[in-house]
Amino acid sequence: MSSANRPPLVVTIDGPAASGKSSTSQMVAAQLGVRHVDSGMIYRLVTAARLRAGGTSESWTEQSVLEEAGRVSVAPGATSFEPLLDGEPCEGEIRGEAVTRTVSLVAQMPRVRAWVNALVRATASVHEIVVDGRDMGTAVFPDARLKVWLVATPEERARRRIVQRTGRQPTSAELAEETRALEARDAKDQPQTQPATDAVWIDTTGITQEEQVRQIVLLARERR
Ligand code: DC
């Protein structure tokens, strides 16, 4: 196919929680001059919308979540898509504790997954994107130009998360607790967290973020 009629570039970066997907994807997108889409952010947005509607999460049905989905949108910015709830920016709310605690429940609902996937595909129909998530290379973009699967040991992912949160290295007790929490989250998200058979695996345990980004950008430029 000539470059004139090739579909817009899509690079998928999937992997488990705290594998560095979002920050790596942002840097890869910036170097390629395309936009970053964080699909986890959209699950978080729908969850925040459902939380605003009230009731305990045990009573949430798929239908009641989808009824709130109309309040959610993503606005293209210079380098990414901004999350909007009722037309207002809501980054703090979607990263907060209440959403983090309940989002796995929402992400397991098949019709919610179909709704999120349609929204992500719509962004790729008009923009070149680097998209990160759990199943972008399998369920959403099986024909993506480049698919990356990022892995790192649970301990290393836990260490990075604590450094990000506190700005210092963890104690061994903190590391053990965060590792347990991450493994519990991995188990909840496991059904939808799958590498594509044609994904390039990058184990980030022993390499810097700059090196990961360099490897992915190189591959993307080869396939562009
Ligand atoms: O990456 P994150 O922590 O922001 O993801 C939020 C939740 O959404 C988490 O429970 C995993 C889920 N998720 C998913 O099931 N599929 C995706 N493509 C992205 C995220």
Image (spheres, rainbow, N blue to C red):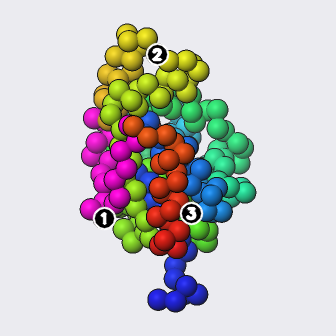
Please report contact status of discs 1 and 3: CB closer than 8 Å, yes or no: no
Residue in view at x 44 percent, y 70 percent: 145
Stretch in magenta: 187-205
Q: In this view, does 103 lie above or below 202?
A: above
Residue linked to disc 1: 198
Which mark sits nearer the N-terminus, 1 or 3? 3
Residue in view at x 47 percent, y 29 percent: 160
80 in the magenta segment: no
Q: Mark 1 is on which residue type?
A: Asp
Residue linked to disc 2: 170
> Residues under labels 2 and 1: Cα distance?
36 Å
Residue in view at x 31 percent, y 28 percent: 184
Residue 155 pos. (x, y %): 35, 26
Residue 27 placement, left or right of 104? right
Quarter holding ligand 1: top left
220 vs 21, nearest the viewer:
220
- Disc number placed over residue 129 in the picture, else none: 3
Residue 205 pos. (x, y %): 38, 37
